[in-house]
Structures are given as structure tokens and as C-alpha cells.
Amino acid sequence: MTGKRLDVTIGNVTEVYDGPGGILWEMLMGEQIHVGGEKETVILAQKAGVNADSHILDVCSALGGPARHLAQTYGCRVTGLDATQRMHREAISRTKQAGLDDKVEFKLGNALDMPFRANTFDVVWGQDAWCYITDKKRLIEECIRVLKPGGVLAFTDWLETGSMSNDEWQPLYTFMVFPYMETLEGYAILAENAGLKVIEREDLTPDFASNVQIYLDKVQNEFRQGILDNYGQDMYDDVEGGITLWRNASAAGKVGRGRLIARK
């Protein structure tokens, strides 16, 4: 488990996603706002055993893209939990427009103090968002509390995958507003210590590096003028510089991404 940590709160994160940060990441990643889009959502759903009878909790559900895709594809029920007001409102609006509000609902709330009863969900789910959570141990414990006996925890996340100096990790975390990143092994230990049986863990770091390069290409080409016109040169320079740092660190194998599946 990592000792690197920035003084970042849930308020700092929601501020970013209530503002231009949320718009930028949707531009680069699409409305699912995670690496790999729908393809990755389908892979995770298959590994989690999602079917029409599943009730899924999507922790840090953002715009609700994965929740809608799951409901549409599998006929399951999905509850999304997110702490960002704009994302929450937008998720509700888009779900209504898609005619899926009978299967998908969204709650505004904190992943470290979930507004749900114990043993409620068949699957607790996350995609590339738990890197924003300030206490991963507490997060995993809350996921387990609301998971039914025999239920599945299934998530992907951005990870620390190599050793970094302070001069390397601090700018990376600052740009993304991450308090800290876990390692894949660290997540597995947290899950096991909390009583889960880890079924699968997979390092997805090579794929992560190629995706970060795609995001940088989009910033420098397709979206360059739009960012300049709407947010100015300083914002463009910050975004290009930050994603370049992540491209370099991911290419060097120092940061990456992983998938973990565990059963209660």
C-alpha cells in the first residue's frame, strides 16, 4: 500500500467535476468517463456475472453512462452514487431522456458513508474513479457492508505501478486531484482483510499507456481550438502539460490501471 498522499478532500474533487474538469474528461473519454468506454464496461459486467436479476451499485457513477449501458444491455437495475452536483443532475436528466429511469436511479452522496442499508446489492461496481477517494480501506468496507452475501465487488482503477520520487508523483496527483493511488496488490489486501475472496486481479497497465497517448493526441489536435476558445491559453497549457506528464509516467510503467473481482 502506498504512502504517497496529497491533502485533497472530496470538496476539491467535486469542484473540479462541477466545473471545466468534468466537461474536459467527457470530451476525451466520452460520457462513460473511464478508459475503454463501453467495451470495458461489458468486460467488467461479464466478469461480475451481471444478468437481468442483478441490482448493481455504481460507486462514483458520474454522468451515469455505464449505469445506462448496463440497464440497456442486461435489463438489470442500477443505482448510481456520486458526490458531484452537476454530474448527479446530468445523470438523472440523460437517464430520463434515454427512457431508462424505471431501471436506473441516482443518489447524491459520499462513498465513505453510503446512504444504503447493509446487504442491498448483488454487485458493487466502480470504473476508474476510486483514485479520487480519500480512504480506500473505508471505501472497501462500505462496499462490503452494502453487498449481499455471495455478492461481487468488481472494479477498475488507476494505480501506482512503479516507484516514483516526490518530484514525479506530486505533479501527477495534483493535476488529477488524486489524494493518493492504491496498488493492485494493495487493493487485493484491503479486500481480503475485509473478508472478501479475491477471484481475479489483472494488471491493465500497457493498455492504459496507449489510452493516455490517445487523450494527449485529442488535446493537441481535435480539441485544441475548443479548449483555447472556451477556457484560454493557460487552461490549455495546464491540460496539455498534465496529460503529457501522465503519458510519460504511464509509458515508463510508473502509473497504470488494474481490474479486481472479489466475492463476499
Image (tube, helix red, strand yellow):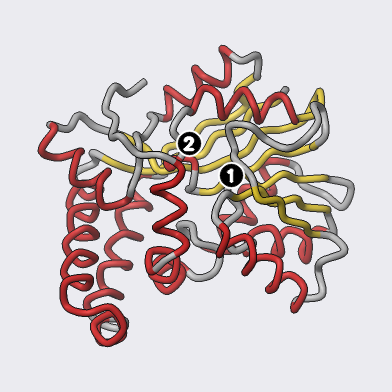
Q: Residue at x 71, y 51 (%)?
A: 107
Is label 2 in a helix, a strand or a loop?
A: strand
Image quarter of the C terminus = top right
State the separation of the CA atoms marked 1 and 2.
Answer: 15 Å
> Relative to 13, is 79 on the left or the right?
right
Q: Quadrant of the N terminus?
A: top left
Residue 126, numbered circle: 1
Residue 263 drawn above or below residue 246: above
Residue 107, above or below 212? above
Picture coordinates of residue 13 (x, y %)? 42, 49
Question: Which amino acid lies under the numbered mark 2 shown in the image of this protein?
Answer: Glu
**Disc 2 marks which residue?**
202
Residue at point 65% right, 14% down? Answer: 195
User: Which element type, helix, strand or loop, lies under badge 1?
Assistant: strand
- Above or below 109: residue 147: above
- How packed is label 2: few (under 14 Cα within 10 Å), some, or many (20 or more)? few
Q: From what the image shows, is residue 46 above or below residue 99?
A: above
12 vs 200, nearest the viewer: 12
Residue 178, given in percent of the width and then of the height, sits at 35, 42
Residue 239, horizontal then vertical, whole percent: 24, 65
